[in-house]
Image (spheres, grey):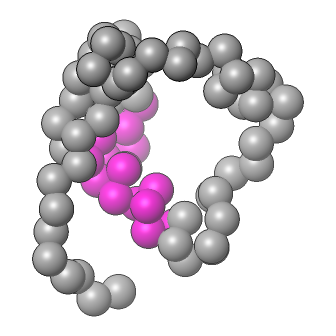
Amino acid sequence: MEMGQLVEVTLEIDAELKEQAEKVLAENGLTLEEATILFFEETVRLEKLPFELDEALKQYIKEQPDTPASDRAGSVRL
């Protein structure tokens, strides 16, 4: 895959979720940034999400607050 112009992506997640994810990713030799890029690349390669949205994930998404991202905790800069 050829790399083009890089852009900065900012997202906000719960601080505890970020810490837990970083721990799991580090155990697998990845940073949060590397894992995010891999997620995007795999999504594009497959032309769909690289995992199934089961009922538990659909429920989790449904339960997320509809507040603007700036009102949520755990800002992360990638």
Query: Measured along the vertical axis of the image, is residue 9 above or below residue 19?
Result: below
Residue displayed at 43% across by 61% down: 40
> Where residue 18 sits: x, y (%)?
34, 23
Q: Is residue 6 above or below residue 67?
A: below
- Residues 47 and 23: in front is 47
Residue 70 place in picture, x, y as percent: 27, 20
Left or right: 7 as drawn, with respect to 71: left
* Residue 17 to residue 41: above or below: above
Q: Which residues are magenta?
A: 24-42
Of residues 38 and 55, the one nearer the viewer is 55
- Residue at 44% x, 68% y is 41
Q: Position of residue 56 (x, y in %)?
A: 79, 25
Q: Magenta part mainly helix, strand or loop? A: helix
Q: Nearer the viewer, residue 65 or 42?
A: 65
Give the residue at x 68% y 51%: 51
Q: Is residue 40 visible?
A: yes
